[in-house]
Image (tube, rainbow, N blue to C red):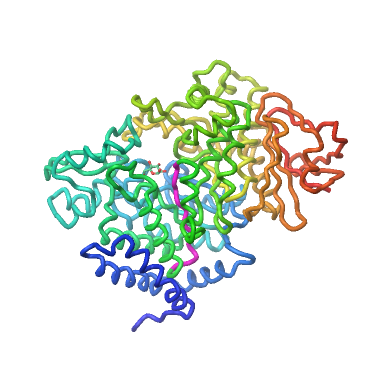
């Protein structure tokens, strides 16, 4: 029987076809296999819709009809990102943990890569050897489907990755290419000798200079060189070949039809390469993402796209789409700039570099959103602009040197316990590894058995989390941070992991110890219940939804960052003291935005403050924060 296409699908298809064709031709128009690839692309879109379960189609429709706009802008969504095996062992067991997430208030799960990847080194699953088979370590596809059914019943959302830029060297395509199959060699960047790789290398930076120097490796089986931007075992897919695009869009639909709500597109900045460039953020990479967005919007419109572009601030912004493609590329991007700048401000006690970045960040188009976070599975990069550091009155080189020393425990007076990741001897660059709690000083404080220092580090943890929870976007908690997990050094004894210190902040959860979240008086309980409260507050304060409704307060005090979230008659002031000292703000700070509140109710401490005269002060204890509603 011929599949039946709904009226809505046909309308979406017809109205997008022109744009799909233009974008496709802008990339593949001159490719000998371009025309054939286009027909395959259209067939793939039709197949995706035809195979989509009715329940998912209905969910698409509900999401499209969300009032006033975009389901994913809601303040009621809060996520957690986790490695299934390290969190609880298997996908089946994860189903038993749904109550735990619900208790915390988390209703969106990001499962770190669960599709098949080689044992041993696999970059935490980001070297995929089969895009459609769940790795035995985690379970089976049916387990994922069962998990999802249960999640849907509980109104929870699912996010997974598509590793778009590369495959594992054990993927069938890579194995065939290695064996000399020309068709599959064209799926990657293969070269007969070093001539072209050497040309590329002139302008390509290294991503993992310590673990994987250079961007090409020699394959002795076929006497050729292949491009491997990340690790040697991650081979870059060749998107100049339309066949690769069609294969990967088909995989994207496979994930969409599993019921994925948000698809995390891993490393999209890298998907197009051009000699003489850094091979990052190229216009063709954006065109491919826009094309993916259009195809998804036609066939599986309930799935939002997150572009994991961890690049310079101005470049991140472009993943939302620019000019006539504004808000037509990725629905989400990670606010990596804000994340890193919060760590910057925490170390210096000075918010000026963070403030210098806000003009850029506020340009995010309406209808798109951030994934906001303090920590994730990756390192903290300090890739924001020198100019932002200059503007705050610091010297970029010295400033970054200080931050690296501060967080790697090499600065006297710093209680942070992290490590430098991917040190580049040639450029002096390095990023930072470490868990939220350890970077906030909890590990040092516990080692010293110093109760006051423990309290202060908990305060830092919560202030960092609160800022990301209220600044706008969907919070993504990194598993373990909800209960204050310290660095986990067991990775040093794990095969395929010891060379990569990002594993220090990817803990193996000890559920016996984690039961402390229910035991008042424990550190775990304090952090868990406070995180729970922050999530609840987000959910009951509608103005926190991401409606491009944030105004920064004027910098009355360089140690305090503050913003106003406003919509209709609703107003909330959010203030964060990044300093280890008590700070004060004149009450006038609350009267600059056309308001004259007489009282401010703090949702966090549940205290009410009488607004004083302009020559009097509102006092913020060290590392405190306030969510103030004017009365
Ligand atoms: C992304 C992932 C990171 C991984 C890289 C290569 O940046 O977050 O963990 O190493 O892509 O796949």
Of residues 256 and 554, the one nearer the viewer is 554
Residue at 52% across / 18% down in the picture? 411
532 in relation to 52, above or below:
above
Magenta-colored stretch includes residue 305: yes
486 in relation to 33, above or below:
above
Residue 166: x and y in percent read 31, 49
Of residues 55 and 549, the one nearer the viewer is 549
Of residues 499 and 518, the one nearer the viewer is 499
Left or right, 591 with reference to 136:
right
Quadrant of res 530 = top right
Residue 236: x and y in percent read 28, 47
**Furthest residue in direction bottom, as rendered:** 1
Q: Which residues are magenta?
A: 300-311
Q: Is residue 147 visible in the rendered structure shown here?
A: no
Residue at 16% across / 41% down in the picture? 219
Quadrant of res 32 = bottom left
Left or right, 206 with reference to 503:
left
């Amino acid at each position: 029987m011929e599949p039946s296409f709904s009226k809505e699908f046909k309308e979406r298809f017809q109205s997008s076809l022109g744009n799909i064709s233009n974008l496709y031709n802008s990339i593949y128009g001159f490719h000998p296999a371009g025309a054939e690839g286009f027909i395959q692309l259209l067939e793939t879109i039709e197949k995706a819709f035809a195979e989509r379960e009715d329940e998912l189609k209905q969910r698409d429709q509900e999401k499209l009809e969300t009032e006033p706009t975009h389901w994913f802008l809601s303040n009621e969504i809060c996520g957690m990102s986790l490695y299934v095996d390290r969190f609880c062992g298997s996908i089946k067991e994860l189903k038993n943990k749904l109550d735990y997430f619900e208790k915390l208030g988390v209703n969106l799960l990001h499962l770190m890569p669960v599709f098949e990847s080689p044992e041993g080194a696999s970059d935490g699953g980001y070297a995929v050897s089969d895009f459609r088979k769940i790795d035995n370590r985690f379970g089976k596809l049916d387990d994922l489907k069962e998990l999802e059914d249960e999640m849907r019943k509980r109104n929870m959302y699912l996010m997974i990755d598509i590793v778009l830029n590369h495959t594992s060297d054990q993927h069938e395509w890579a194995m065939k290419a290695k064996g000399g199959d020309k068709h599959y060699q064209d799926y990657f960047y293969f070269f007969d000798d070093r001539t072209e790789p050497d040309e590329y290398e002139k302008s390509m930076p290294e991503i993992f200079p310590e673990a994987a120097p250079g961007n090409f490796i020699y394959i002795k089986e076929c006497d050729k060189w292949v491009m491997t931007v990340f690790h040697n075992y991650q081979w870059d897919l060749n998107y100049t070949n339309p066949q690769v695009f069609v294969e990967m869009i088909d995989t994207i639909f496979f994930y969409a039809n599993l019921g994925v709500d948000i698809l995390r597109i891993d490393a999209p900045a890298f998907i197009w390469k051009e000699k003489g460039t850094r091979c990052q953020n190229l216009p063709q990479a954006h065109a491919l993402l826009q094309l993916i967005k259009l195809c998804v919007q036609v066939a599986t419109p309930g799935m939002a796209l997150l572009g994991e572009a961890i690049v310079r601030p101005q470049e991140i912004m472009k993943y939302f789409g620019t000019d006539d493609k504004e808000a037509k590329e990725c629905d989400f991007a990670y606010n990596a700039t804000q994340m890193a700048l919060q760590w910057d401000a925490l170390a210096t006690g000075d918010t000026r570099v963070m403030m210098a970045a806000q003009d850029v960040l506020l340009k995010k188009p309406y209808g798109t959103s951030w994934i906001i976070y303090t920590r994730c599975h990756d390192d903290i990069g300090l890739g924001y602009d020198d100019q932002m550091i200059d503007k705050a009155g610091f010297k970029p080189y010295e400033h970054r040197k200080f931050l690296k020393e501060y967080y790697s425990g090499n600065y006297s007076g710093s209680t942070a316990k992290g490590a430098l990741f991917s040190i580049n001897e040639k450029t002096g660059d390095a990023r930072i590894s470490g868990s939220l709690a350890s970077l906030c000083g909890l590990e040092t404080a516990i080692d010293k058995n110093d109760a006051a220092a423990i309290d202060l580090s908990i305060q830092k943890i919560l202030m960092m989390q609160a800022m990301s929870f209220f600044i706008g976007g969907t919070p993504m908690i990194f598993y373990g941070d909800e209960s204050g997990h310290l660095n986990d050094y067991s990775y040093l004894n794990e095969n395929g992991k010891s060379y990569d210190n990002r594993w220090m902040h990817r803990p193996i959860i000890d559920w016996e110890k984690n039961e402390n979240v229910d035991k008042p008086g424990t550190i775990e309980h304090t952090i868990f219940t406070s995180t729970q409260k922050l999530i609840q507050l987000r959910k009951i304060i509608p103005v926190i939804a991401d409606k491009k409704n944030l105004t920064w307060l004027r910098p009355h005090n360089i140690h305090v960052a503050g913003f106003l979230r406003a919509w209709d008659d609703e107003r909330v002031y959010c203030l964060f003291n990044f300093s280890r000292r008590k700070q004060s703000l004149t009450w006038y700070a609350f009267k600059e935005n056309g308001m004259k509140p007489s009282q401010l109710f703090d949702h966090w401490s549940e205290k009410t403050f009488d607004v004083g005269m302009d020559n009097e002060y509102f006092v913020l204890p060290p590392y405190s924060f306030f969510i103030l509603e004017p009365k």
